[in-house]
Image: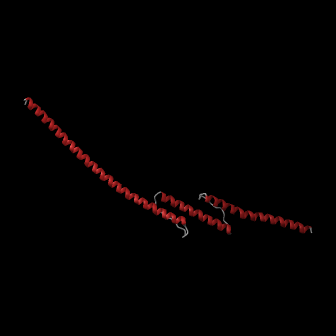
Amino acid sequence: VRVVVIFGFLALLLGIFFSIIIYRSLTKPIFRIANAASALSRGDVNLTIDVNSKNEIGVLANSIREIINSLKDKSETAQKIANGDYSTTVNVLSDDDLLGKSMIVMKDALEKREEDLRIINKELESKVEERTKELQNSLEAESDLNNRLTGLNVALNLSAIVATTDLKGNI
């Protein structure tokens, strides 16, 4: 009986020991995945998930890695678009990829607005050039008129001198 009790107690201790090992082997990766998901929800995509299980936990870890990689790709693409590179390709992962589709709409709209601004800018430059020519022509006409008036003023002054001289009888 004593031997049975001792073996029973040892079996119980081994059961507790293995239960703790199994518990830790399951909870540690789940906590790592949960921490990564929490950081991801705050916008942090510079994450690595150190879980390499072949079970359901490993499948979950791989799914979170795919989300992280997708968001990193979208972030890099958004930065290129923000810098004016509209030739960059937005990767749409599926028909359900709302973010990818929205980024394409955004990229196309920004590209269109930039082209509209180029057209408006050309029109404005043309109008400025036209107005500058008009002002130059006005200045030239004003300068020409000033020269004529100066010449006329000189002629009138000479005529006044001659007339004054004639009236005094001094020629």
Count of marks overlaid on the render: 0
- Give x and y (percent) for residue 107: 47, 62
Quadrant occupied by the N terminus? bottom right
- Give x and y (percent) for residue 42: 61, 57
- Give x and y (percent) for residue 87: 45, 63
Question: Residue extending furthest front?
Answer: 167
Q: Is residue 54 visible?
A: no
Residue 8 quadrant: bottom right
Of residues 52 and 24, the one nearer the viewer is: 24
- Give x and y (percent) for residue 57: 68, 67
Quadrant occupied by the C terminus? top left
Residue 4 quadrant: bottom right
Q: Is residue 15 visible?
A: yes
Please name the residue shown 64% across and 59% down the image.
38
**Position of 124 compared to 28: left or right?**
left
**Position of 169 compared to 101: left or right?**
left
Please name the residue shown 76% across and 63% down the image.
21
Of residues 21 and 152, the one nearer the viewer is: 152
Depicted 161 relative to depicted 79: above or below: above
Question: Residue extending furthest bottom?
Answer: 95
Please name the residue shown 43% across and 62% down the image.
112
Check the image and tell me how it is coloured: secondary structure
Please name the residue shown 34% across and 54% down the image.
125
Depicted 51 relative to depicted 166: above or below: below
Depicted 83 relative to depicted 95: above or below: above
Residue 145 quadrant: top left
**Position of 79 compared to 61: left or right?**
left
